[in-house]
Image: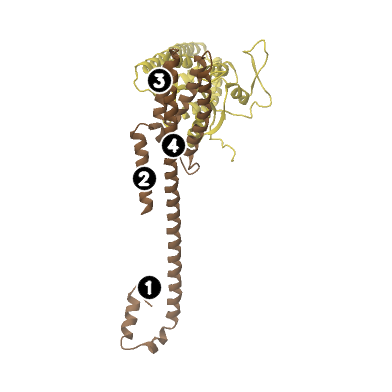
Chain colours: A yellow, B brown
Amino acid sequence: MGMATESQFHVLAVDDSLIDRKLIEKLLKISSFQVTTVDSGTKALEFLGLHEHDQSKPSTLTISPNNHQEVEVNLIITDYCMPGMTGYDLLKKIKESSSLRNIPVVIMSSENVPSRISRCLEEGAEEFFLKPVRLADVNRLRPHMMKTKLKDPIQEKLEKHEDIDDETEKPELQSQEQQEQQQHQQQQQQPQQQQQQSQQQQLSSSNKRKTLEEGLSPDRTRPRYNGIATVV
Amino acid sequence: MDRNHLKRQVDLMKRSLFDQGYLDEQFIQLEELQDDDNPNFVEEIVTLFFNDSARLLQNIEQALVSVPIDFARLDNYMHQFKGSSSSIGAKRVKNECTRFKEYCTAGNAEGCFRTFVQVKQEHAILRTKLETYFQAYISFMCVFVLVIFALTYICLLFCLYLFSWQDKLDHLGLQEVKLDDYMDEGGSLIIDLYYKYDKAHMIE
């Protein structure tokens, strides 16, 4: 098979069901993504280059020096109900890891349980798909992956911008600080609003297909920039 | 034409599967994923389902006859089975699974037994129907492909025939000056006709 081109996104799919693995693999391939499938959360973490560091501190994870930087994963899509490590556990582990935290994670489940959905979203999942997953759902993945690809150059730019800020005169500094504070407050409010919006949408929507985009897309650009600006 | 008859049969079979509730929209989603890279995707995934589900059904059966019944384990197996059925669009099977899960959650062993019989029955019926469907579909595709090949072959032969005529006519053209030798009363008329008609219409 040919090597992945720079423009092709790599998705890691995690599901214990053989049928669902085959299906999601086909859906992703048809959408021109490079796909790797694994059948458990532990195998997913292995693939991502994470290993349990210490038995006494199970939350501490180190990166295997051999695997790091060789495998670039742009998105992880995982089933919720899996034996051993559930999709939620996998999500938590990924978000706890400093190296993998930025990879967007999507959860799939055959059961429409609002509390489960909101819990996953709160933990940092980008989307929650109801099974069986369709092509329309997979089409919604691309923006999340592009967001990650864009993030790094923007982060560098903003860090440079902050350095320049430090050198400017005080009054200008103060006004910029005020702006940043306001943006920081807004950024804190926006995720809460987004969560509330998404929860309301979930519970009130008769359509079982989750639609976050309506609530998020206008606000997306703001948090993306501000989220990085506040991370110093 | 035999091909049309087969196609109609295939379409009717598919329609009947949907009308009678054996399949739902997910099956159509699978068909839409079929492309040149994977022309048998639907059949492959359905075959995978029936192989995989046979194993699950066995597990469920064993769990049902064990004493005492572990309802949590039963629910887990049935959850997997229901998920797979849903993924291929097996509507009736999925519905029976839902009923089973309700009895399972309630801890109703007898209800589970009864529903499981239904589950197995729907599973078997769907298997037979889909096997028949895919056989007809494959027959149709084979005939379709054969017909395409035959038509291509005939076109090729026709082209060759035309080219051979071309040669003959070119040959004739070199002998134009000698045509007078062959002319009879209708000879000049024949020459006129020759230049007017398309070569393909020339009759020897």
Instruction: Choose mark 1 or mark 2, whichever is in front.
Output: 2
In what element is the residue under mark 1? helix
Q: Earlier in the sequence, mark 2 or mark 4?
A: 2
The residue that mark 1 highlights is B199
Tag 2: amino acid: Gln
Towards the viewer: B156 or A153: B156
Q: Earlier in the sequence, mark 2 or mark 3?
A: 2
Q: Which mark, residue B99?
A: 3
- Point 34% across, 38% down: residue: B15
Q: Earlier in the sequence, mark 3 or mark 1?
A: 3
Chain to which mark 4 belongs: B
Could you tell me if residue A31 is visible in this image?
no
Marks 3 and 1 close (CB-CB < 8 Å): no
In what element is the residue under mark 4? helix
Q: Earlier in the sequence, mark 1 or mark 4?
A: 4
Marks 3 and 4 close (CB-CB < 8 Å): no
Instruction: Choose mark 3 or mark 1, whichever is in front.
Output: 3
Instruction: Choose mark 2 or mark 4, whichever is in front.
Output: 4
Tag 4: amino acid: Thr
